[in-house]
Amino acid sequence: MITIQQLSDKLLRAEYAVRGPIVIRAQELEAQGRKIIYCNIGNPQALKQPPLTFMRQILSLVEYPELLTKAQELYPKDVVERARDILTKNPSGTGAYTQSAGIPFIRKAVADFIANRDGIPANPANVILTDGASKGAQAVLTALLRSPKDGFMIPIPQYPLYSASLTLYGGEQIGYYLDEENGWQLNETILTQSLNQAKSKGINPVGLVVINPGNPTGAVLSQENIAMIIKFARQHKLALIADEVYQENVYATDREFHSFAKVMHALGDTDTPLFSLHSVSKGFLGECGHRGGYLEMRNIPENVLAEFIKLQSISLCANVPGQLVTYLMVAPPKPGDASHELYVRERDSILRDLKEKATLLGQGIQQVPGMFVDIPQGAMYAFVRFELPHKPGVDPTQMSADQREKYEAERDNAYCLALLEETGICVVPGSGFGQRAGTLHFRTTFLPPRDEMEDLVKHLGGFHVRYVEKLRSSAS
């Protein structure tokens, strides 16, 4: 029998807090009959967000073409026409492998989407369809990590896909802190300090990851901030990974999404490699289970592109239903189509609901003494800071960096576990994403239905007050 000691050390060291021990405990409690409000992961349809009718109608016809014989009686005209067109362009259907980089007409649709979104040229040859954005990110890490001393700059806090994947692939993590006091924007001074510190340790920085809108912060980067980041990457010869899967999720009226591709084009930068990611899992689709997305590459030569396609071919191709959902994401019904009105109504309802719940969460938490958060500007998350008293005689400033990190991780994990046990609210400790020394956070989504979000805000405030009082009482 195989033992854990025989497993890869890289696997054993990789951590992914979003589905960690607290989530496992939540599932145990749920099996015992407890009601759990899952706020640990951006999984909209698991939290009662309905799928868009247009998507599922077309998928049903393409997956089972025999339905087309009666489709005129069951589906809108444009749905039937679109399904027939898909099957004409991809006659082997959903049960056969496609080209390694993805079905050609879908790659072209992605390029058209980018060109229309940004008003810039986009080349279908530089698009690879992927099993979600995660696979695109991992492809870039795989391709660019040439030695164990190569590293990627990743945000702190960050979505742990990046830290876990770097551990698995044997690369170095170069953390850079986001500026919490400035709405979680990036700070050039902090970037420079992180880069120089990494180099002083013998690490070779090869890339920079940016998540916009932010996970776990919910921040939306300004155009000026993005321009600074691109200039920084160009100055230090870094490849850029632009994780833009939440580009449809912008709620703040004074913010809008700016793609890295558009800003880079405006700057005239034709040298800095840019790898942009998008996904069907987020936005207003929430089609996480279909695992669809794309990787678009800029400023790379033909021989490098060929290697990326070769890498994709090792896994044969992305799953076909996921490719189709990606197509429908970038080529939705047009005005005048029979499905357009319903599509817009369902889309706007989902986005309006998310905006209202973001406001509900942010305003509610702001009323709790010792808890701090801005109303999320975008994405699906809030990274909530909270304060806890220390035990008598404990002075974290006298601890080493490793001791302090362990101490604070124990504190935010204990807090989140107690929150789960007492209230049924499942959130993720901030230590799973990274946080500045001396701060405590947790990440929560605002995806559950509105009534559950109202309960969450109410129970969270009461729990925090009781938890702090309990700590103070035990210290006296």
Image (spheres, rainbow, N blue to C red):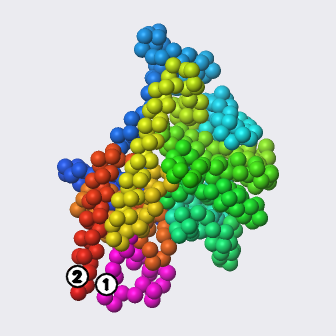
Label 1 sits on residue: 391
Disc 2 to disc 1: CB gap under 8 Å: yes
User: On the image, which quarter does residue 100 sit in?
Assistant: top right
Screen quadrant of the N terminus: bottom left
N-term mark: 2 or 1: 1
Confirm whether the magenta stretch covers residue 241. Answer: no
Q: Nearer the viewer, residue 82 or 10?
A: 82
User: On the image, which quarter does residue 413 sit in?
Assistant: bottom left
Q: Which residues are magenta?
A: 386-411
**What percent of the width, then of the height, locates residue 162?**
55, 58
What kind of residue is marked 1?
A: Lys
Confirm whether the magenta stretch covers residue 393. Answer: yes
What kind of residue is marked 2?
A: Ser
Q: Is residue 161 above or below residue 112?
A: below
Q: Nearer the viewer, residue 409 or 165?
A: 409
Q: Nearer the viewer, residue 179 or 2?
A: 179
| Residue in view at x 41 percent, y 67 percent | 372
Label 2 sits on residue: 474
**What percent of the width, then of the height, locates residue 239?**
70, 57
**Is residue 94 shown left or right of residue 429?**
right
**Is residue 413 shown left or right of residue 101?**
left
